[in-house]
Amino acid sequence: DLIENNRRRMALLEEAARQLYREWFVRLRFPGHEHTPITNGIPKGWQRLSIAALVERDEVDLQTGPFGTQLKASDYTESGAPVINVRNIGFGELRPEKLEFVPEEVAERLQQHVLRTGDIVFGRKGAVDRHLLIRSTQEGWIQGSDCIRMRSCSSRVSTLLMSLAFRETPHKQWMITQCSNKATMASLNQEVLGRIEALLPSQLILDEFVNIATDAFRQIGNLWTQNERLRAARDLLLPRLMSGEVKV
C-alpha cells in the first residue's frame, strides 16, 4: 500500500510539473507574459536553437556510448557501477529492471561515459521516443553502448526543461518519424539529435521555472528511493511470512 501510495504521489508531482511546463512554454502564459511582445511565436528575449547549434557553441555536449571493444560482455559483474542500457530508459524515468553492473575499475576506465545529475540519456535502437533524465541517485552510473548522452554545459540550457518537452506527444512523434527505417529497427544518432529545436527562455523565467520544477522532481526522487527500500523490505520479509518463519 505504501509503494502504491508513493507511486500515485510521484505521478501527481510529475503531472504538476508537466502542466506548469505547458502553461509557461506551450501556451506562453509565463509570469509577465502580458507585457512581453511575441514575434513569430517567440517572446522577446527568448531563443529557439537546434541542439547542433548549441553543440557548436559548447553549450551542449553529446557523447555516444562506449564501443564494443571498450565495454565487453565479459566486463559485466553481479555488482558495482550500474550501466544504463536502452531497456532501462522510460519516458523521463528509470526502468530499473534487469540493470547490469561493471566493476569500479571498469567504470574508472570509462570516465567519459560516467553520468552526472541532469544528463539526458537516449537509446540508439528501437525506443527512440524515450529518454532518461539522470537524477542524483543515479550520479556515477555508466551509459551503455546502445545509448547517447546529452549534457548541458551552460546555465542557459536546462535539461530539466528539455526533458519535460521530450515527454510531450508531438516530440515523441517527431522522433519516431525522424528515426524510422522501413528496412530495419528505428535508430537514433547525433545527427538526428542535432536537429531537435530547444527553447531557451529568458534567464529570469528559466531560473524561476527550474526552481519550482526541481523541487517537484526532488520529491519524486525521494519517493522513488523510499519505494526501492520498501520493495527490498517486502522481498526480504514476504517469503518468511509465507513460510511461517515470521509470525504476524
Image (cartoon, grey):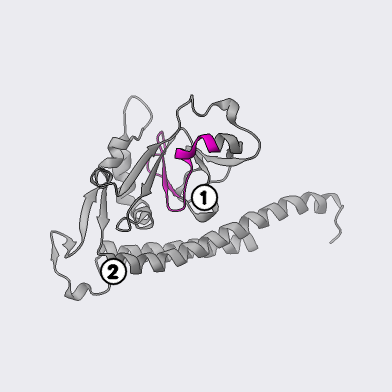
Figure check: 224 above or below 215: above
Between the C-alphas of marks 2 and 1, the distance is: 28 Å
Q: Which residues are magenta?
A: 108-133
The mark that comes first in sequence, 2 or 1, is 1
Please give left or right for residue 61 compared with residue 90 in the image.
left
Which residue sits at x=31%, y=64%? 206
Figure check: 125 above or below 88: above
Figure check: 180 above or below 31: above
Q: Quadrant of the C terminus?
A: bottom right
Q: Which mark is residue 139?
A: 1
Q: Is residue 151 visible?
A: yes
Please give left or right for residue 75 compared with residue 58 in the image.
right
Helix, strand or loop under label 1: loop
Q: Residues within 10 Å of mark 2 (few under 14, many from 20)?
A: few
What amino acid is found at the position of numbered circle 2 in the picture? Answer: Leu
Which residue sits at x=56%, y=62%? 222
The reply to whether dot 2 and dot 1 touch (C-beta < 8 Å) is: no
Figure check: 24 above or below 243: below
Which residue sits at x=86%, y=59%? 247
Which residue sits at x=49%, y=54%? 135
Q: Which mark is residue 204?
A: 2
